[in-house]
Amino acid sequence: MDGVVNVFEVQSIYNAMEEINQIKEESFRTCDEGMKQARQTLEETQSEEQTSKAMLNVGKEIEMLKHARVIELEVELAAAVAELTAVTPNLVAMATTSARIAEIESQLIQARQEYEEAIRHREALEQRYDMALKCVNLAQERLETLQMKFELNKRNIDFTVIHGISRMNMAYEDLIKYIARITPEIRNHIDKWFNEKPKEKELIKPNEIRNRLDVSNSVIDALLEYLYITDLRFRTSIDNYCNEIKLGDVVGVELKIKKNMVGRLCEELVIRSFKPISTQIVTQRRETLPDGSYTKVDMIVYGLTNPIILGRGEGMGTRAGGSLGVEVKSGHSAYLYSQLNHMLNQAIGHEGCDISCVICTRDIHDLSNEKENELREKLRKAGSPIIGLLPRKDNLDTRCIEFVKGKMKDV
């Protein structure tokens, strides 16, 4: 594997499979911990409910005792009042009975106060018990909801991991097979293009960008192979092209390849060219235009790690840390010229970037001097000068068509 792993970062795919399994296990542990906490919460609320219920029962008993005492004293008071009527006009007996009535009334006042306090205490305990019941119900619902969600999430994670790792393992094996088929010289050339980075803070000049995008056929083929292996949607589209060719629609498929596949290839070439000098590249960002419509910016290169100069003139360079907006256009000269108004609208979407440009195929040089100058001048004034750095459209068409036909034996 020495000298092979670095091309396309093959080992990172293998490592990613292990990391995904680790993430799966961590996710499962998190779910289990969440269930454990939910069960503990339910147990605590159930314990509180039982405590509150016991306290409420005691409170009710105390209230009943206090109420019974009030009734008892009321009966005694009624009997004493009746006795007072019976002993009248015996002054001695009346005095004794009146004294007993006063004592009973005093005790009754105290008993009624204690009874009212017992009622308030019982009502407070009922509120506590009601809240405890609600907490138990909420904890039970939470536990059941979490259990349902966690089980569903576990199944989804398990399914995704199994299929994802299977897909990554296929990609890993396909890359190893592809790399084994190419010569060490081409392998080193591809590896250098994919992984080479400029020195820190080193100025990136126009000729270096031009050289970076002046890719060989081996780099084009390698990038197509990498996309086929790692991008499921790209692979599916290529396999569909192969099946359509087998059904006899060769001309139709070639037109689709030239229209769709080449454009994707050019975007990937530009992304890979700027990736070594950026911290983030965002693609297909939607930007609103002044008239309320919108455009999609092909890519914005954020956090440039090196100062960069795209070409001569004002607004063609920025310092490290800046941002670069890029539109990518692939096509013959007539197509590039026909896209002028569209590119002018897209340039509005670049206004938030420090610098911007349109990178196109070198077919722009096939325009007449008048049309080429018009195209360049209008886009320069719009703030996104056009630069013909990508390989010619015919060569890209040929490489993509040959790549698809080369895959027919595998489909």
Image (cartoon, helix red, strand yellow):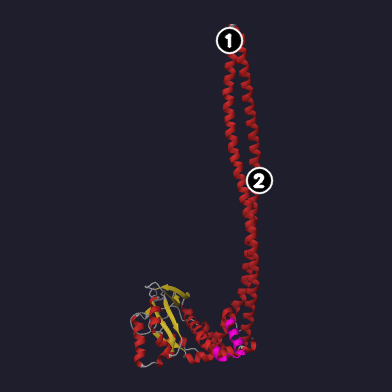
> In the picture, which quadrant includes the C terminus?
bottom right
The label number, if any, that marks residue 380 in the structure image = none
Count of marks placed on residues:
2
Q: Residue at x 66, y 36 (%)?
A: 57
Q: Vertically, is 144 above or below 334?
A: above
> Picture coordinates of residue 2 (x, y %)?
61, 84
Instruction: Using the image, tell me which numbered label, if any, was put on residue 47.
Output: 2
Magenta-drawn stretch contains 340: no
Disc marking residue 95: 1
Q: Amino acid at mark 2?
A: Ser
Identify the secondary structure beneath mark 1.
Answer: helix
Percent coordinates x, y for residue 107 in the rendering: 59, 21
Most foreground residue, 185 or 363: 363
Q: Quadrant of the N terminus?
A: bottom right
Residue type at the position of mark 1: Ala
Range shown magenta: 236-252
Q: In this rendered view, identify the residue nearer to me: 175 or 46.
A: 46
Mark earlier in primary sequence (1, 2): 2
Question: Which one is nearer the viewer's eye here, 115 or 22?
Answer: 115
The picture places residue 85, in percent across and down from the top left corner, at: 60, 11
Q: Position of residue 175 (x, y in %)?
A: 61, 83
| Dot 2: element | helix
